[in-house]
Image: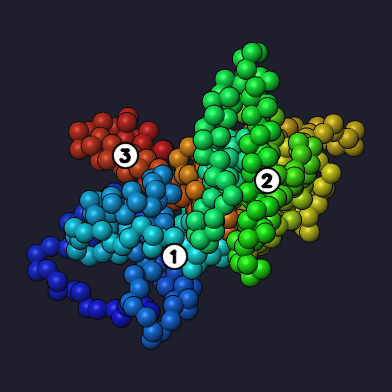
Amino acid sequence: MLKTNKNDGQRALFFSLRDSLSQAHPLYILSEKINWDVFDQAFGCLYCPDNGAPAKPIRLMVGLLILKHLRNLSDESVVEQWSENIYYQYLCGEEMFCPKQPCAASELVHFRHRIGESGCELILQESIRINGKDGNEGDIHADTTVQEKNITYPTDAKLHRKIISKCQGIAKKESLILRQSYTQTLKKLGVDQRFRNHPKNKQKAVKADRRVKTIAGRLVRELGRKLPPDSLSLLRLALFEQVLSQKRTDKNKIYSLHEPEVQCISKGKEHKKYEFGNKVSILYTQNTGVIVGAMGFRNPYDGHTLEPVLQQYERLLGKQAKTLTADRGYRGVARVNETIIQTPKPFSSKLSKYKQQKLRKTFKRRAAIEPTIGHLKADHRLSRNFYKGIIGDNINVMLAAAAYNFKRMINIWKVFFALFLNLLLDMIYGRKERVEKLLWAF
């Protein structure tokens, strides 16, 4: 249930955040530029009107999500820092300083599940609107990258040991007595599995791996016999059986027990041959550098990601893109609806020199999306996804893209106020030449 709005206009006679904070601070400007009513109207219907405990304000929860990806923080950290930072509080709609935490960190998880992918897409749409005309460019670039999942590097030995521990947990939960616990046996096998790269220990480690797999299969079969037919744990046993039966050359392999949707993706990187997560498609304006599309996929061919992400572009901006420039990984697709797909290839003799030169510049300009992807990974939590499931993959991508767009405008405002301050000082001290240069910069 949503809280009723209260009149807090006279909570303090001589102090309020609006009057005391610096109006040149980027977060202050951002709080004034965002249209918070859009989120109230879109998410208000997701709450029960008259039942349940009063919920936290929608602006507070949306602001915390923005701050989390804008400053690369965890749920726990953003909630903790909110109580220490008055600009965070003003962005989230507070009028007075609040010394306590706004909510529990787990409430951010519930709010993300409540708004879903459509809600995060609305936040991305608002970040594009904040950028004004820069986000309305018709010529865009596209590229794909890998969003790694928060899992350990998968090996058969790790998976088999996890199956054993999960089976022991299921037996304890269901109050079942196993024929053997294998505790001491697994300790000895763990010693044999160490230092497998040494030539003298290789055969011993391989033999220990086979033994651990045998023990995992025994426990899975024993639980399958002893569990009741209506037990939900049988679904987990089916997953364990699939892991035990898969081979190296199989397709659709399982690399994690708690994230079975994870894909093994190879992008040809020398320092990282394989990445475990999902593929991400990014759309980026050609000249202004605004992210106008971000979607998560499993591991399709790059050309098959174009139609869904262009449909998202049309939903966000209300129009179709004129041209889309991509790398050679997209070759084979020439047009999607009204959008022309341009990929590097030998020029036809029918093209004029002017058009050839223009296309060369466009293909060179496409490389500007690579540092953008680097910033998304390093600064806005795209490098490792901590959200669960396929929905978590898609939510993390869109929130990271929205944070990048907000950060872009924050950097522009910083430069603008720095130029304005220098211009003011030069006018005061009579530096005419510098004043003329700064006026040209404006």
Q: Is residue 175 above or below residue 73?
A: below
Callout 2, which amino acid? Gly
- Lower position in the chain sequence, tag 2 or tag 3: 2
The image quarter in which residue 50 lies = bottom left
Q: Is mark 3 on a helix, strand or loop?
A: helix
Between the residue at mark 1 and the residue at mark 2, the CA separation in whole angstroms equals 40 Å
> Pointer 3: what residue?
418
- Mark 1 near mark 2, Cβ–Cβ under 8 Å? no
8 relative to 267 in the view: left or right? left
x%, y% of residue 178?
57, 52
- Residue extending furthest front? 179
Q: Is mark 2 on a helix, strand or loop?
A: helix
Label 1: few (<14), some (14–19) or many (≥20) C-alpha neighbours in 10 Å:
some
> Pointer 2: what residue?
217
x%, y% of residue 301?
77, 45
* Front-lying residue, 341 or 427: 341
10 relative to 320 in the view: left or right? left
Label 3: few (<14), some (14–19) or many (≥20) C-alpha neighbours in 10 Å:
few
x%, y% of residue 176?
54, 58
Q: Is residue 356 above or below residue 77?
A: above
- Lower position in the chain sequence, tag 1 or tag 2: 1
Callout 1, which amino acid? Phe
* Front-lying residue, 40 or 162: 162
Q: Residue at x 64, y 41 (%)?
A: 215
